[in-house]
Amino acid sequence: MMIRKPRIVLVCLCLFTLIFAANALAWNFMQAAATNDNRENFLVPVSPNTKAITKVKPQPVVKTRPAFGFQQRAQALAQERLLQCPLPTLRFRGWELDAQAMFARTRGKLTFWNSQFGFSTSWNQQPEIDFNSAMGIPDHSVVGTFSARYKFKPRWSVKYLITPTVINGSGNPGNWFQFGAGQSLQSKWERLSQQIGLVYDPILTPTSRVGIFADYVRIRERVRFGNNGWSGSTFGGSAFDNDLDMAMAGIEMEKLVKVTRSCSTFSCECKAGVAFLDDAFGADLSTGLKYSVNLNNGRSGYLKGGYRYLTYKKGYSDTKMIDVAMDGGFVEMGFLF
């Protein structure tokens, strides 16, 4: 009995030793996997061509903003393009010449106290005479305008503009406006408008220009009537003379719209002027698109098209008055040198 008890104790000690040894190995294995020691390297045979096993470290994610950089680059290229191809303007001590053809719709009326010019003896009153229906003047005509400009200072220039107009008409108006019984009426409208003035450019950049102008306007015109030619000896005749000396003030603006690959430019140009003095009132308004071509050495040519409205009115008295208006599309061609 004494012999068996030590054996049982010995067997129990062996079993406990095996259990504790197994637990100890598992614990050490988990710790080895949790540490940063590269214990796997011990399992790899050592050779000159063998590379150490390393853990891959993920690179930090960096967000990119391609749109912002693209916008900056586009703006920089556009600004550089504008500097290379600015809006063509008149240079210092340079000239600008242009010619315009206006496809105008002419309208007007006048009042003139004259027994041969519309005075009705039956009603003892002076009617208004319409240019188109009474005088037979065509309601559509081409009106030409020519102008020249010289820049004598970097922001100051002087300009001159002339508009000659001659329109012939014929018709058969009412009896109160008839020169001889059964005879048709012949009419002629002659008009010469001249402007001279100064232009100051307070805003002058590569993409825009704003100018303020002040002009002296002189208009001389005559409306004549007759039957057989212009002698008027057989059936009589008469003429209406109108002389205007006015001042005009206004503003003109030009804005660059687009630059082409060939360094040509598209721009929008607007002009507005108001005439006054001499008991008269007038206005000259225009807007259009302008295509300019660079001819090198500060020279350029352009072609412009748009719409123009021109009017003036003067009342001498209750028995003498004239009111004229022209409006329509126009084309214009000019050179800067």
Image: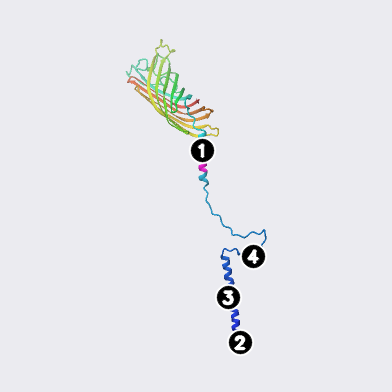
Q: Position of residue 10 (x, y in %)?
A: 60, 82
Q: Indicate the quadrant where residue 173 lies.
A: top left
Tags 1 and 2 in contact by the CB under 8 Å rule?
Answer: no
- What residue sits right under mark 2 in the picture? 4
Q: Position of residue 117 (x, y in %)?
A: 37, 16
Please name the amino acid that badge 2 sits on. Answer: Arg
Task: Say few, some or many: other residues with alpha carbon within 10 Å of mark 1 (under 14 / 14 to 19 / 20 or more).
Answer: few
How far is mark 2 from mark 4, CA to CA?
47 Å
Dot 4 or dot 1, earlier in sequence:
4
Please name the amino acid that badge 1 sits on. Answer: Ala
Tell me, for residue 43, which label it has, or none: 4
- What residue sits right under mark 1 in the picture? 78
Residue 141 visible in the current orientation: no
Classify mark 2: helix, strand or loop: helix
> Observer-nearest residue: 282 or 161?
161
> Observer-nearest residue: 34 or 336?
34
How far is mark 2 from mark 3, CA to CA?
25 Å
Task: Say few, some or many: other residues with alpha carbon within 10 Å of mark 2 (under 14 / 14 to 19 / 20 or more).
Answer: few
How far is mark 3 from mark 1, CA to CA?
81 Å
Q: Left or right of 50: which side holds 71? A: left
Tags 2 and 3 in contact by the CB under 8 Å rule?
Answer: no
Please name the amino acid that badge 4 sits on. Answer: Leu
How far is mark 4 from mark 3, CA to CA?
26 Å
- What residue sits right under mark 3 in the picture? 20
Q: Left or right of 93: which side holds 281? A: left
Classify mark 1: helix, strand or loop: helix
Magenta span: 70-74
